Image (cartoon, helix red, strand yellow):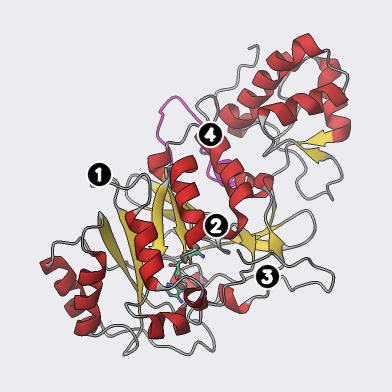
């Protein structure tokens, strides 16, 4: 490689704001990239090499334009520039919380908007990525659920969020080797398992050893309980699983997570028992939002212990994050801690999540963009 760049921050960044008509290479598989090379007249014997050069520039160095890709040859770079791009989603707004959390409102090429959140911790950070514009699940305590679903994100848009965050945080590989983004949580807008193919494609590229190379242990996918897709996720992606349980009986869960009417608790728990890559070292996280006098009694806590018996599990207790017009209140501290004590006494780790980024509406379930459903928008099928 001839480039003498020390950090990807030195790289010129492409014009993200321009309306994108060029084919975006981000999110394409190697065979798809090879087809793109063919369409530019690259002879067959060179395609494999070109694909691997491109792959390294895009995913290892984080190049935001073709100009920087010096070993591709001037002529090919010029042809790429005319008809292709490596554009990330555009940024509509950036908000920084007093606790360091950053929320970006992202504008996609078609004008739709989604949110992405970075949650820094002492020596690492988590990036919370969206999988859909809006959500079809309508969980009654979730702000995103009040948005009409517009559409699934493409693999390039899911992966592009991660790449954009690395750009913004100057987090592409550098000699110090410390990463600001050390984990990814698929916990932004949308239900990732309702957009399985695109999520899988993006995560597979993120885990590819010749590129970003984030390990599957550093990735957590959260689902509201789309039972038929869970086994496949564990078998194919082998990422950590988080399940938004939130209630211990079907009557309450039907109200909180309407998807429960389709896949009730018993089926969901069985799917967790069967989740291919769960074991004691890699426990399933159960998310449990604390709603005052809805799901937070001591009986509920005991029932939760009973339900989870035998599953390698940890429980995240999430104090309810309010949003305008929400029909719930957060449980009192007292009730949350008594609930946690029951779980701890039964041997479960049950940390009470400190809400992050509440002041900028970046906390769990507070994400909502202004994207409205367009009349002709295609509806994503519920599985
Ligand atoms: N659809 C997936 C991914 C979203 S993850 C899922 O349901 O798991 C977002 C997490 O935040 C989920 O556990 C969700 O139930 C939780 N959540 C939603 N609204 C919330 C709120 N107002 N307060 C606290 N947690 C909330």
Q: What percent of the width, then of the height, locates residue 244?
A: 41, 67
Distance, label 3 to label 1, CA atoms, is 36 Å
- Distance CA(mark 1)–CA(mark 4): 29 Å
Q: Residue at x 21, y 70 (%)?
A: 305
Where residue 91 sits, quadrant-wise, is bottom right
Q: Secondary structure at mark 2?
A: helix
Q: Which residue is mark 3?
A: 149
- Residue drawn 41% across the image and 80% down it: 253
Sequence-wise, the earlier of marks 4 and 2 is 4
Q: Residue at image x 36%, y 83%?
A: 291
> Which residue is identified by label 4?
172
Q: Secondary structure at mark 1?
A: loop
- When asked about the image quadrant of residue 113, the answer is bottom right
Residue 277 part of the magenta-drawn span: no
Residue shown at the point (20%, 83%) measured from the top left? 299
Name which of mark 3 and mark 2 comes first in the sequence: 3
Q: Check the picture and name the quadrant holding the N terminus.
A: top right
Mark 4 residue crowding within 10 angstroms, few (<14) / some (14–19) / many (20+): many
Q: Measure how far apart labels 3 and 2 are at the Cα level.
A: 15 Å
For marks 3 and 4, give the CA distance: 32 Å
For the residues bearing labels 3 and 4, Cβ distance under 8 angstroms: no
Q: Which residue is tagged 2?
A: 193
Closer to the N terminus: mark 1 or mark 4?
A: 4
Looking at the rendering, the stretch of residues picked out in magenta corresponds to: 162-181
* Residue mark closest to the camera, 4 vs 2: 2
């Amino acid at each position: 490689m001839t480039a003498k760049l020390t950090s990807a921050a030195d790289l010129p960044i492409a014009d993200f704001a321009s309306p994108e008509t060029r084919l975006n290479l981000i999110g394409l598989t190697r065979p798809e990239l090879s087809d793109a090379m063919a369409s530019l007249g690259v002879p067959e014997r060179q395609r494999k090499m070109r694909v691997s050069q491109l792959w390294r520039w895009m995913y290892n160095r984080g190049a935001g334009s073709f100009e920087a890709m010096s070993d591709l040859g001037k002529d090919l770079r010029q042809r790429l520039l005319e008809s292709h791009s490596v554009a990330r989603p555009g940024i509509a707004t950036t908000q920084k919380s007093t606790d360091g959390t950053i929320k970006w409102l992202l504008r996609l090429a078609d004008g739709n908007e989604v949110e992405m959140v970075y949650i820094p911790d002492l020596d690492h950070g988590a990036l919370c990525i969206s999988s859909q514009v809006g959500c079809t699940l309508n969980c009654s305590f979730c702000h995103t659920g009040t948005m009409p679903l517009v559409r699934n994100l493409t693999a390039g848009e899911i992966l592009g969020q991660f790449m954009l965050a690395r750009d913004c945080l100057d987090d592409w590989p550098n000699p110090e080797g410390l990463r600001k983004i050390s984990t990814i949580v698929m916990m932004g807008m949308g239900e990732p398992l309702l957009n399985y193919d695109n999520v899988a494609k993006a995560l597979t590229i993120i885990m590819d050893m010749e590129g970003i190379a984030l390990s599957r242990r550093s990735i957590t996918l959260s689902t509201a309980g789309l039972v038929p897709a869970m086994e496949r996720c564990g078998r194919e992606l082998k990422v950590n699983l988080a399940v938004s349980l939130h209630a211990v009986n079907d009557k309450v869960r039907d109200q909180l997570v309407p998807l429960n009417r389709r896949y009730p608790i018993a089926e969901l728990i069985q799917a967790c028992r069967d989740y291919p890559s769960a074991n004691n070292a890699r426990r399933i996280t159960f998310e449990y939002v604390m709603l005052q006098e809805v799901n937070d009694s001591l009986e509920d806590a005991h029932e939760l212990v009973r339900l989870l018996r035998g599953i390698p599990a940890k429980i995240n207790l999430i104090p309810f994050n309010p949003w305008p017009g929400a029909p719930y209140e957060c449980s009192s501290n007292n009730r949350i801690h008594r609930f946690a004590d029951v779980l701890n006494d039964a041997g479960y780790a049950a940390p009470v999540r400190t809400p992050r980024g509440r002041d900028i509406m970046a906390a769990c379930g507070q994400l909502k963009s202004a994207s409205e459903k367009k009349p002709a928008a295609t509806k994503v099928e519920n599985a």
